[in-house]
Amino acid sequence: MSCSALISSVDKKRRRASPSLSSSLGIGRASHFGLDGARANCMGPLAEVTVEVPMSGALGVMRGTATRHENAKGCVVLCHGFRSSRNTRLLRGLVEALDASGWSTARFDFPGNGDSDGEFRYGNYAQEAEAIADVVRHLDDSSTELELGTVRAVLGHSKGANSLLLYLEQQQQQKEDGGEKEGPVHGVVGVAVAGRYDVREGVVERFSREALEELETAGEVVQRDGRGVYKVSREGMRERMALDMPAAIARIGTRPEGPEVLVIHGTEDAVVPHEDAAQIAKALGKRAEIVLVPGADHNFAGDIALGQLTSSVVAFVNRATAVPQM
């Protein structure tokens, strides 16, 4: 879709009807938490170590933080959202909850974000999916040295959820093509937190008509948010608008050996409509488990919302990675 087409959409924001969360969706499991869910674990400081992950293509290194649990069940990789970092309250809350349940964790900054090398690029989903693959390979190759255990799950929040889903689809395709028969997605489950079903949506809410016009004519526009200013290129916008995320998600759901995925969303998310969670879960089919947290916003602010998020993630990861009893 061109910038001109986006401009014509500014005044035509459509609302999607909320799909039913019934078994008719073909969803494996569905949950809807009440407001009296568990609170986040209150723990002391965890022992952390900085990890540097080389990026594909000699683009520098991604920097991350790992927490090691003695006799860990395995490692869970945590991915942040748009223009964010590995040190959000949401990711730190997940680190504490997973540690309490016997998991090591590794969280990192995507290229051009936080402490990692590179420049921030708008769109960039394919590179972030490759970044996740780089992290998983590095952690598994360094498992003896780092003592984190094998990567068993990957979680992404917001934009990171979409990069996670794209990673799962791409790695599964590589396995089927014979490129990585025992690749990093082998045995890995996914958790998509507050992800968007179709990344072609949500653009007109973030950009004014004037900004889109400048992007079309000048090829670049400067945007401002709560974290400061950032540049958006015409190429980056076109990359986002060309990404068919619904098709990528559907390919995960149709593969006989695809990964299990937890889809979790807050009902008061003002950034990504919670209806997107049902659409993602429907596309994933029986491999999806969906959880809606009443009253939670995009970042699961507040102890109750964060506690419901962390307890749902821990329960899913424990169940989905459990070794079947013979």
Image: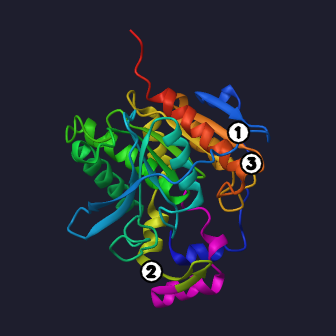
* Residue at the image point whose x is 52% and y is 66% from the top: 82
User: Could you tell me which secondary element the residue under label 2 belongs to?
Assistant: strand
Q: CA distance from mark 3 to mark 1?
A: 30 Å
* Residue at the image point whose x is 46% and y is 51% from the top: 78
Q: Is residue 171 visible?
A: yes
- Is the residue 196 above or below the residue 1 in the image? above
Tell me the quarter of the image containing the C terminus.
top left
Q: Which mark is residue 46?
A: none
User: Could you tell me which secondary element the residue under label 1 belongs to?
Assistant: loop
Q: CA distance from mark 1 to mark 2?
A: 43 Å
Query: Which of the two labelled residues, at mark 2 and mark 3, occupies the earlier sequence position?
Result: 3
Whether tag 3 and tag 1 are in contact, CB under 8 A, the answer is no
x, y percentage for residue 300?
A: 67, 54
x, y percentage for residue 13?
A: 71, 66
Q: CA distance from mark 2 to mark 3?
A: 32 Å
Question: In screen coordinates, is 257 left or right of 305?
Answer: left
Disc 2: which residue: 233
* Residue at the image point whose x is 65% and y is 81% from the top: 208
Q: Which mark is residue 38?
A: 1
* Residue at the image point whose x is 41% and y is 64% from the top: 109
- Which stretch is magenta? 195-221
State the residue in front, 135 or 15.
135
Query: Which of the two labelled residues, at mark 3 and mark 1, occupies the earlier sequence position?
Result: 3
Q: Residues within 10 Å of mark 3 (few under 14, many from 20)?
A: few
Disc 3: which residue: 17
